[in-house]
């Protein structure tokens, strides 16, 4: 009987000790959980702050870029607008010229005495017969023929914004040279030398 009571007491002590250990484990687990939960909240808050700062810097950089590019965009727009208005004015002026004046503009100050070989004239934009009359007078027996061609077929040219490109291309019989006498070429030279004056005349320095 004494042994049974001793066993019961031992069992109760073991159970009590086990409960104590279990309580300690549960309390520690609760503390650990609170720490984890607290750290998660802190990490989330830090991540949110980092993202907020990141996007704030991105937005600021975009704003700075926008402020930096606006003056350039404005300047590009002004230059493009002025160029278009100048070209429009030139097209209007060209349309008011007679055929003879347009041919004279295409020829410019070309020295026909420098042509020492027989040549064929390829013509675009003009009437072949109109140009032939002028060239026969200037080239005399060196002009073999006048033929019609198309803009940019024999010689690559910039349009320079002209609505009706017109010109004459002289080609030597032995193909040793080609000479370009075009309105596009003359207009390009005028734009290179007189762009500022044309702009001043059109806009009066208002842009």
Image: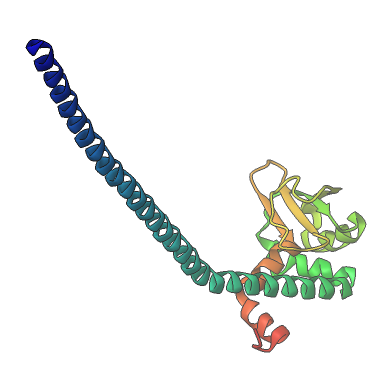
Classify residue 136 as left or right of residue 43: right
Q: Give me the residue at 69% from left, 70% from top.
A: 109
The quarter of the image holding the N terminus is top left
Q: Give me the residue at 78% from left, 63% from top.
A: 162
Based on the displayed image, in which of its 4 quarters is residue 132 positioned? bottom right
Classify residue 66 as left or right of residue 37: right
- Relative depth, front residue between 7 and 105: 7
Classify residue 79 as left or right of residue 85: left
Please count the marks in the image.
Answer: 0
Residue 72 position within the rendered picture, expressed as x and y whole percent measured from the top left: 54, 70
- Relative depth, front residue between 111 and 81: 81
The quarter of the image holding the C terminus is bottom right
Residue 55 position within the rendered picture, expressed as x and y whole percent measured from the top left: 45, 58
Q: Give me the residue at 68% from left, 41% from top.
A: 174
- Relative depth, front residue between 4 and 199: 4
Based on the displayed image, in which of its 4 quarters is residue 7 positioned? top left
Based on the displayed image, in which of its 4 quarters is residue 191 positioned? bottom right
Residue 170 position within the rendered picture, expressed as x and y whole percent measured from the top left: 74, 52
């Amino acid at each position: 009987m004494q042994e049974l009571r001793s066993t019961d007491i031992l069992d109760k002590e073991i159970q009590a000790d086990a409960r104590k250990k279990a309580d300690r484990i549960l309390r520690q687990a609760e503390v650990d959980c609170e720490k984890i939960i607290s750290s998660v909240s802190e990490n989330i808050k830090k991540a949110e702050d980092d993202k907020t700062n990141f996007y704030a810097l991105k937005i600021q950089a975009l704003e700075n870029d926008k402020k930096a590019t606006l003056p350039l965009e404005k300047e590009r727009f002004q230059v493009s607008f002025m160029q278009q208005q100048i070209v429009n004015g030139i097209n209007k002026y060209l349309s008011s010229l007679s055929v003879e004046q347009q041919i004279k503009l295409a020829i410019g100050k070309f020295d026909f005495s420098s042509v020492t070989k027989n040549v064929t004239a390829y013509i675009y934009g003009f009437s072949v017969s109109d140009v032939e009359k002028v060239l026969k007078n200037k080239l005399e027996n060196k002009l073999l023929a006048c033929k019609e061609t198309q803009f940019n077929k024999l010689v690559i040219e910039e349009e320079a914004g002209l609505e009706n490109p017109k010109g004459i291309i002289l080609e030597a019989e032995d193909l040793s040279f080609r000479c370009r006498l075009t309105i596009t070429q003359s207009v390009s030279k005028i734009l290179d030398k007189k762009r500022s004056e044309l702009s001043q005349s059109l806009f009066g320095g208002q842009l």
